[in-house]
Amino acid sequence: MLIINIITRINLGAFRQEFAPHSATNHIRGTLPNILKETEVQEMKQKESNKTNRTKQEFGKPQRKSQPFACQTHAFLPPLGLTIILIIALTINSYGQIETPKPPKVSTFEQVNINQTPTYKTPGENNYQRNNGTAIYENDLKKQQSRQQMIYEIRREAEMANSKTAVSYELPSYGHIPATNHYKSAFSELVEMIDTNYSVQRANFIVENAFYENQGKYESFDNLITQIGQFLIRKMEELNYDQSSNLSKNLILFQFFSDTLKIESKNLEHLPFKYEFDDYMGHNDWANMFVEKLLRTNKGQCHSLPLLYLILAEEIGAEAHLAFSPNHSYIKFQDDNGKWINVELTNGMLTTDAFILQSGYMKAEALQNKIYMQPLTKKQLLSEMMVDLAKGYSIKFGYDEFVEQVIEKAIEIYPANVFAQMVKSDYRTLHFFYVQRQINVPPDRIHEYPKAKELLDKMYEQYEIVDNLGYEEMPLEDYEKWLNSLNEAKQKQESQQMILKLNKSIEFRR
């Protein structure tokens, strides 16, 4: 404020000097009639002595205010003496605002009003030739605009300095909410599993139970999985399956998910799981993605069904792996000859790699980076479970430093985890726009805020990482269309042929 006041005072002095010539103009207008009166008296005496024929009315003409100043000067200058000429010359030059009148010519004669404002020069502007107030106004307007711009810049810099100190460059934390402690303890347990032969069942349980704020009991969940495992083993015994065969164990798992299984001696029966068409992406209720909900309702989708398959495979000693395709996950396992088999649990079918490639959203870069159609190792699977933990936290609370911490660890143990990279991309985007809304500047001014510019650069860097991995967004309508194509007659026929072939292979091994 002090700076603005000083500038205003300085400019006010210039403002007064700029308009000083107006007082000189008024002084000239007051002096000019006195000079004319002295001239008239002397001319009248001169003309009486020469006995001219001029009338008194002619001597009165110069007194008319409407008579042009140039005419008066032209009428009286010739008979004036040297003294009068010098007086007029000295008077005009002393003020410097009136040019010496030139004798009028017939062709160029123009009447000039005595009350017309004389041409004058503003001090410091020697080239000023205009004889009206327009130029003065324009010049003053420019100076005022310059002063206003200067004041605006000073205020803007002051506001910018204040706003920079007030900007929060970190996303709001939800760590003060007691329920977040369940997620923190779950993450600590997952980290401890990184270099161990951890339990998939335990890892999945703590991820889901954090969302339920640790209301679930692991003992109950473990007992249920144990009972299903015993059911599968007994069914293998009833079918006389080789319990050391990975193919046999995976085939009984496939039947458990897709067919009705009965154990007559125990009067036990299990119905096939159904696909959950309502909210299959968990947009309305994230718990719809959980294994707990699948076991409770017998309905699931491509997230919960493969996870339960892996949990049960672990329970009966089968080897199976999670794999991904665009917007989808499925199971891959090897038969006893090392051949890979794809299990599609959403509709209880076996599929080929050729069918998965038909989705149309699988770039060459994605295949080269092995983000799709690759069996995950156990460490890579743990990375995916960390992604589920971070997503559940963000849905329940929001994005903050905890989400970033979990995702960074997930990427550390599996850099090509495209889903972890996408969550990080979401985090970077929300982080930048949270700051951008505070500073409220257009893109061409973001460089004025170095920290915000750094966040913007990190956001674009993360976008590039996701793109370079070969990820391409698959619209939900295209995903549903591709998924429904599994029910076409051709796909069903191929699946039946594959199942018959596997059964024959098991019978041959008996």
Image (cartoon, helix red, strand yellow):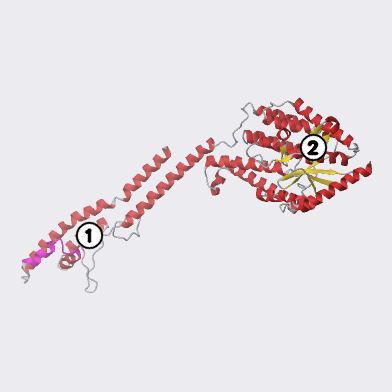
Judged by depth in the image, the label closer to the viewer, 1 or 2, is 2
Q: Is residue 64 magenta?
A: yes
Q: Residue furthest bottom?
A: 107
Residue at (78, 29) in percent of width and height? 224
Q: Secondary structure at mark 2?
A: helix
Say above or below: 290 vs 328: above
Number of numbered discs: 2
Quarter of the view holding residue 12: top left
**Residue 35 screen position, x and y as percent:** 16, 58
Quarter of the view holding residue 135: bottom left
Q: Is residue 510 left or right of residue 372?
A: right
Q: Magenta stretch mostly in which secondary structure?
A: helix
Q: Mark 2 Cα within 10 Å, few/some/many (few <14, many 20+)?
A: some
Q: Is residue 72 left or right of residue 279?
A: left
* Disc on res. 366: none
Q: Amino acid at mark 2?
A: Leu
**Residue 384 screen position, x and y as percent:** 74, 39
Q: Could you tell me if residue 337 is visible in this image? A: no
Q: Is residue 386 left or right of residue 320?
A: left
Q: Is residue 85 magenta?
A: no
Which mark sits nearer the N-terminus, 1 or 2? 1
**Residue 390 screen position, x and y as percent:** 68, 36
Magenta region: 56-69
Position of the C terminus, as image quadrant, is top right
Give the distance between the C-alpha atoms of the residues marked 1 and 2, in whole angstroms. Answer: 103 Å
Q: Amino acid at mark 1?
A: Gln
Q: Which residue is mark 1?
A: 116
Position of the N terminus, as image quadrant, is top left
Say above or below: 387 vs 82: above
Q: Mark 1 Cα within 10 Å, few/some/many (few <14, many 20+)?
A: few
Q: Which residue is mark 2?
A: 310
Q: Secondary structure at mark 1?
A: loop
